[in-house]
Image (cartoon, coloured by chain):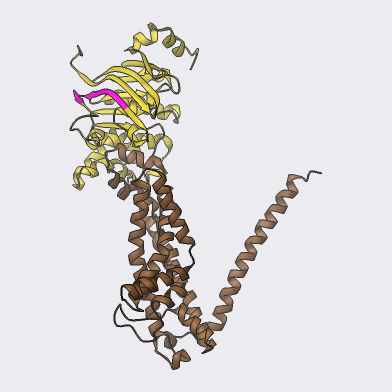
Amino acid sequence: MRVSPKYTQIGAVTILGAATAFTVAILIFIIIFVLEKGLPVLSFNFLFTNPSDMGRSGGILPILIGTVLLPVLAIIVAAPLGICTSVYLVEFTLESRVTRLIRFGTDCLAGVPSIIFGLFGFIFFVTILGMGWSIMSGGLSLALMILPTIIRTSEEAIRAVPKAYREVSFSLGASRWQTVRKVVLPNALPGVVTGVVLGIGRSIEETAVVIFTAGSSLLIPTSLFDSTRTMAVHFYILAREGLSMENAYGTAASLIIAVLIVNLTAYWMMHRFIAKRN
Amino acid sequence: MSLEKNIKIDTRHLNLYFFEEKILKDINLEITSNQILGIIGPAGSGKTTFLRSLNRMNELEPGSRIEGQILLDGIDIYNSELDVISLRKRVGIVFALPVALPMSIYENVVYGVRLSGIKDKARLDEIVEKSLSAAFLWDELKDRLNLSGLRLSGGQQQRLCLARVLAMEPDVILLDEPCSGLDPISTSWIEDALIELKKNYTIVLVTNNTMQAARVADKTAFFLMGELLEVGLTKQIFTAPVKQETNDYITGRFG
């Protein structure tokens, strides 16, 4: 028996809509759950005072600093490296076995569990290069972790710029680099920014890599070679060692809000850029 | 070789391949200065490929290779000190699909000029007005120069593409079916512009619309299966073609 398209249409819309509603509901549930437990703890004092008694009481100032420094260092290293790589791969190489191999490699790296990057960072940066548990080791390890994501998202964004734009640019006497700078990159920017924001988000919320490479010091770092702790690690230690669930949730709430601020700022900047151009 | 003195472009025994496939076969064609050369022929006859070889656009596709010579003012454009960037500034092209770059109308027009290093605002303003006027677009757009080029209609975008090429003051303008997606009014705007422009430029117009060639071209060339079958004064090609195939194509018996 053939079901009338009218009913399959209703059925499809119901299932698709329900799946969406379910996903959004879970997301909202998690956020509300964390914020409900964390917000009462969250205050100016909590954010800007030093922790005491291993974090059982006091605030998270050094952790806040670590949470800003590590991703900033990671993104300063990974974004230019990743964007340049993707531009080179798309614009300056012909599709060949080598480029396919590189792409396959980055895809594999993107899928490697973060703890492997942590282990590598520990062996290479902390031990071999002698940087110790430090912001430097942590930032560089995080940079390696987010590099494949940035490369692949930028690559897709650059590839999505219509071929006709490039052709027009070349026909007007532009070199390949001028074409990249004036036409390709401005048009790929939203996608590139998305990749970078994803990278920032991943490095803010990363735990394993940071524990292995940046340590878990509760002191305010005074140099890039000091150990530090990020909110994600702080949350993990507080909860795992049963030190203080209140402060753990307070930290978690700060983390969620931090990620939200990063994302909103990035998208706001991007929209301003696009609006300005059009 | 040429008896006429004012030969702008001279192709000699031009063969063009994409990988192993021979797309253009032994093309010998002289293009006269300050005239419009119309190129007609059925789809797949190689007319677009020929056009794109005149400013080395085919090189952007993998696997292209040429034999023979293309001389621009007597200088071989493939094997000489003339680099491809200077070549494309002297030989501009308007593509079949109008593509405004995603920037303002003003920036679209001065794109090529800025690349040449002209920064003076007054000079750029002057170029924009002159180029848009020559493309019959100035009166429509003079108050909206900061509008994104993407907001224009297809016909306006195509005239913008023409203005963008004119801004560079090339010697030669190549047009690849510039009116294929345009309505009759936009088409006549473009045709009027071309007739006006040939005073200062050499124009090569590939068209699928044989009547368009008849209307605007001084000379017409007929391409078939990668060969230049016949070239002559437009009037002669349309009234007394030498080859049977030309006659069949013009009268619509195949194509």
The number of callouts visible is 0
Residue B233, image x and y in percent?
Answer: 31, 12
The reply, left or right, for residue A38 in relation to residue A75 is right
Chain with colour brown in the figure: A
The reply, left or right, for residue B79 in relation to residue A30 is left
Residue at the image point whose x is 69% and y is 57% from the top: A15
Quarter of the figure with residue A193:
bottom left
Chain with colour yellow in the figure: B
Quarter of the figure with residue B249:
top left
Span of residues in magenta: B66-75
* Looking at the image, residue A189 lies above or below residue B118: below
Residue B5, image x and y in percent?
Answer: 18, 15
Which quadrant is home to the N terminus of chain A? top right
Can residue B154 be seen in this snapshot? yes
Residue at the image point whose x is 44% and y is 13% from the top: B250
Does the stretch in magenta take in B19?
Answer: no
